[in-house]
C-alpha cells in the first residue's frame, strides 16, 4: 500500500488528517507504516508552528485503524468505526516532532480483538530511535 489515498480508503480520517502515507508490511497481528507529514506546515494537529509529541498517540491510534481496515478488506468487508477509549503506558521521548528531518515509522501489534473492542500496542520511531510507545483501546461505535 503505497499512498495516503489507499490508506484513506480504509479509515475515516481524510485529507491531511490521514497521518500515514504508506504501509511497509502487515499481517494478521500488526503492521509497519511510514509518514513524512510531520514536517508539513499545514499539518492539522500543529499548534502555531509546532507539532507536539503528544500527537504521536493519534498516530498510534491511526495505526490501529489502518490495520483493522486491512484485515476487514482481506475478509471481504469494511472495518467498523471505533472510538478511542483508553491510552495506557504511554511514553513520550521528545517534546515536538515537526523539526525531525526524516520519516516516522509506526509499528502496531494487536493484543486483543473482540467483536466490539480492540487493543493494540504501538511504537513510533524516527531514524530507528523510539519517540513514543503505549497501548490503546478502541470500542466499536453503535
Image: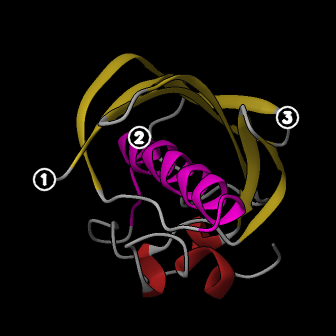
Residue picked out by circle 3: 128
Marked residue nearer the N-terminal end (3 or 1): 3
Pinpoint residue 108: horizontal percent, then vertical percent.
64, 35
Could you tell me which secondary element the residue under label 2 belongs to? helix
Q: Is residue 43 visible?
A: no
Taking the image as shown, residue 85 lies to the left or right of residue 117, namely: left
User: Marks 2 and 1, how far apart in space?
Assistant: 24 Å
Marked residue nearer the N-terminal end (3 or 2): 2
Task: Please identify the quarter of the rendering in which residue 43 is found.
Answer: bottom left
Residue segment shown in magenta: 50-76
Q: Is residue 103 visible?
A: yes
Taking the image as shown, residue 31 lies to the left or right of residue 99, namely: right
- The residue depicted at 60 percent of the width and 72 percent of the height is 37
Q: Nearer the viewer, mark 3 or mark 2?
A: 2
Residue picked out by circle 1: 142
Task: Please identify the quarter of the rendering in which residue 30 is found.
Answer: top right
Q: Main secondary structure of the magenta part?
A: helix
User: Marks 3 and 2, how far apart in space?
Assistant: 18 Å
- The residue depicted at 56 percent of the width and 60 percent of the height is 69
Residue picked out by circle 2: 57
Pinpoint residue 76: horizontal percent, then vertical percent.
63, 68
Compared to residue 86, the image places residue 95 above or below, namely below
Amino acid at each position: 500500500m503505497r499512498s495516503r489515498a489507499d490508506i484513506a480508503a480504509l479509515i475515516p480520517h481524510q485529507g491531511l488528517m490521514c497521518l500515514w502515507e504508506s504501509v511497509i508490511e502487515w499481517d494478521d497481528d500488526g503492521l509497519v507504516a511510514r509518514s513524512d507529514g510531520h514536517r508539513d506546515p499545514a499539518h492539522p494537529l500543529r499548534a502555531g508552528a509546532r507539532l507536539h509529541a503528544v500527537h504521536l498517540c493519534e498516530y498510534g491510534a491511526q495505526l490501529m485503524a489502518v490495520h483493522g481496515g486491512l484485515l476487514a478488506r482481506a475478509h471481504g468487508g469494511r472495518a467498523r468505526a471505533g472510538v478511542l477509549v483508553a491510552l495506557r503506558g504511554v511514553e513520550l521521548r521528545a517534546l515536538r516532532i515537526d523539526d525531525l528531518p526524516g520519516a516516522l515509522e509506526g509499528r502496531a501489534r494487536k493484543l486483543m480483538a473482540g467483536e466490539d473492542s480492540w487493543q493494540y500496542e504501538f511504537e513510533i520511531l524516527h531514524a530507528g530511535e523510539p519517540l513514543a510507545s503505549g497501548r490503546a483501546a478502541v470500542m466499536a461505535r453503535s
